[in-house]
Image (tube, rainbow, N blue to C red):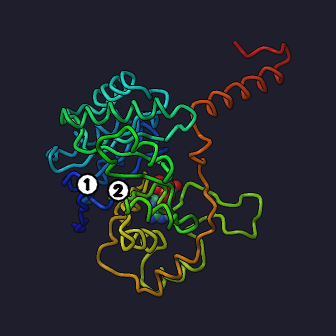
Amino acid sequence: MPNVPYVTLNNGVTMPMLGLGVYLTPGDQTASAVQSALSAGYRMVDTAAVYGNEREVGEGIKRSGLNRSDLFVTTKLWMADYGYDQALRGFDASLEKLGLDYVDLYLLHWPAPSSFEATSSAYRAAESLLAQKRTRAIGVCNFNADHLDRLAWTATIGPAINQIELHPLFSQQKLRRENAARNIVTQAWSPIGGIYINHPNDPSHITRVLDHPVLVGLAAKHGRTAAQVVLRWHIQNGTAVIPKSVNSQRIAQNIRVFDFALTDDDMHAIDALDTGTRAGRDPEQFDMDFIRARAAAAKKAEQAASPTGRSPG
Ligand code: A2P
């Protein structure tokens, strides 16, 4: 079984450096992906209220037969549930779906800068859940240094984790340093960049991280896959990772990254791939206002396209 190292968080809780992500894992494939991961040696699973698969994550955990205390389960509060009371209700709903008594890590999903007061209130609710031992650690996702500083005005406990978009084409060196300076562990989402296509309108640009010739070359050099090389790069950088896969072979492959090492030159070659361009949402823009405006625009376009000018019933 691969020996996954643990990192110690700001409150002494330890967390595996590698776990299974389930963003975009369809509900009907989630329980079996979690089961495959746990039998391959994973002990951490990362989900979120908005992924719609917490119930199935709980099912996969139950099927594994493993002791709860040996597992590390993360879920996230969606922005629509920001605010103190709403956050407590959101947490209860997640816990009920997961079928658990507690989670190991509870994260705010996005900073939601246009209504940051609600964000801060949600974080204070997370602090109270921590005090009640209903979560063993708390943190945030997609916060930049400014968001972290704004949160610190009202927080009494610093976030243990900042989970951010991070892969070789967007390697976030500055934000990783900002996290470290605040004793926050950086965790990468989309760590192998698999679900994001960079520069879709310009085919001369690399579109898939794992197809990049530098990574393909390093994979050949080490007798590994490009995904393993990238995951190893994260681990050597001290970044925790949650690669997603629904395929049991790729799930097993992604955890076999603790029995080889990249050289300094290899690490620098991967560092040099940074484009400085994110593939996912910009945390400064992405909030409930953005989501509501997008939904309204989509509805308007649908109404305009319909012959009666109305939405289909
Ligand atoms: P699949 O679920 O079919 O395996 P990330 O977590 O970085 O966003 O990457 C997830 C994407 O990468 C998914 O599309 C996943 O597809 C794919 N993927 C996961 N592991 C590997 C691997 N070892 N090699 C190639 N693709 C992978």
User: Which residue shows up at 36% across the image and 61% down it?
Assistant: 240
Q: Quadrant of the C terminus?
A: top right
Label 2 secondary element: loop
Sequence order check, earlier mark of 2 and 1 = 1
Residue lying farthest front? 153
Quadrant holding the N terminus: bottom left
Location of residue 258 in the rendering, given as x and y in whole percent from the top left corner: 30, 73
Left/right of residue 137 with respect to residue 200 in the rendered view: left
| Residue 249 image offset from top left, x and y in percent | 38, 61
Task: Say whether marks 2 and 1 touch (CB < 8 Å).
Answer: yes
Residue 184: mark: 2
Residue type of the residue flagged with mark 2: Ile
Q: Which SS class for mark 1?
A: loop
Q: What label sits on residue 278 in the rendered view? A: none
Q: How many marks?
A: 2
Residue 8: image quadrant is bottom left
| Residue beneath the point at 58% across and 67% down | 169
Mark number displayed over residue 10: 1
Spot occupied by residue 239 in the image (x, y as percentages of width and height): 38, 64
Q: Is residue 99 left or right of residue 309?
A: left
Give the quadrant of residue 157: top left
Comparing 130 with 70, the one in front is: 130
Amino acid at dot 1? Asn
Image vertical order of residue 306 relative to residue 95, above or below: above
Mark 1, Cα crowd under 10 Å, few <14 / some 14-19 / many 20+, is some
- State the separation of the CA atoms marked 2 and 1: 7 Å
